[in-house]
Image (tube, helix red, strand yellow):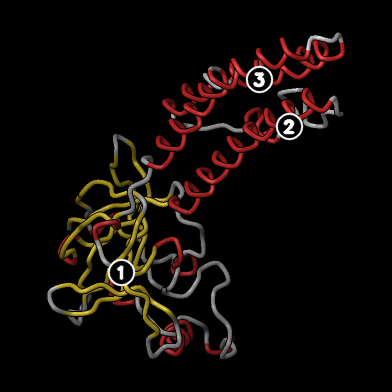
Amino acid sequence: MEFLSFQHDQQHYAVPIASVRFITADNSLKLTRVALGDGQQHDMVEFDGNACVVLSLANLLGQDSAQTEVQALVDLLHAREHDHVSWLDALEDSLIHDSEFTKARDPNQCAFGRWYNDFHTENEALAHLLEKFDAPHQRIHALANELLTMRDDGETDAAMAILSEHKRTTLIRLQSLFSDARNMVSSSVRPTVIMIQDGKNQVIGLKVDDIGEVFSCSEEQQDTGSDELLPYFAHAWLKAVELNGEQVTVMQLNPDLLLLNQDQLQHQLQRHQPQQHQPQQDQRPATFASAG
């Protein structure tokens, strides 16, 4: 049997290739937020003349999507760039008004410096780009002691000229690096929507972070005996699957269970519980969020 694989947070997932109707980039769809009868808000898209629900795999798993994490990093880079524009403005104000300069002089103590020293990435291109921040970032912070000493020695005009020059050069270089980093981070994730048809011929969209390969899997590789380790919308573990030259375990999703509402979910969970341990009506697996 053939499957389409995709990935989230190091875990591999798959759906039968026979259930896949269409694959497209998330940004190519016109999504509409709609409240359905289950009391939840869902993204909807028109497909083959029908309104189809679009779910997020990350939301189903109760986790942040890679896109959310990427946006958080982009926002952080925007903020740290603005910090250094403000830092130079504060230094200029101190030079002009002979006032105290209270910003961090040590490049390791500003918010960007602390983040920069602790941040690690497996993206080699991003790591190489970040290395280029070090020299201009240190040079900007070195200006504080240098120019404030000049001011105190009566050389304010010369200090202002040096500051103006670094605003036109070093700061512009640092801002260019921030821009390049944001663009690289933004392009590292391209959310994709898989339109999946369930057993009732209902089509559901599933948004994933990273589409993988199509692979074949035998019945012997399917493990349905570990149901307690599977979320309600999964069917089986697929063992010893060859992906990207490695053998991995893949979670096979069940298209028929992706869109369960709360009542249907409770019924499905109760079917899998021993009779003497029937869950209360409001119980559900804590690890996984409800569909949508």
Q: How far across and down, in percent of the image, does residue 79 sit?
A: 60, 42
Q: How far across and down, in percent of the image, does residue 28 sit?
A: 24, 58
Question: Mark 3 belongs to which amino acid?
Answer: Ile
User: Element at badge 1?
Assistant: loop
Say which residue label 2 marks: 90
The answer to whether residue 5 is left or right of residue 78 is left
Residue sitting at 22 percent across and 75 percent down?
198
From mark 3 to mark 2, how far is it between C-alphas?
A: 12 Å
The answer to whether residue 277 is left or right of residue 93 is left
From mark 3 to mark 1, how far is it between C-alphas?
A: 45 Å
Closer to the N terminus: mark 3 or mark 2?
2
The answer to whether mark 3 and mark 2 are in CB contact below 8 A is: no
Tell me, for residue 283, which label it has, or none. none
Say which residue label 3 marks: 140
Question: Mark 2 belongs to which amino acid?
Answer: Ala
Please state which of residues 235 and 82 is positioned toward the viewer in this rendering.
82
Tell me if residue 121 comes above or below residue 76 in the rendering.
above
Numbered circles on residues, count: 3
Residue sitting at 29 percent across and 57 percent down?
26
Say which residue label 1 marks: 31
Q: Where the N terminus falls, by quadrant?
A: bottom left
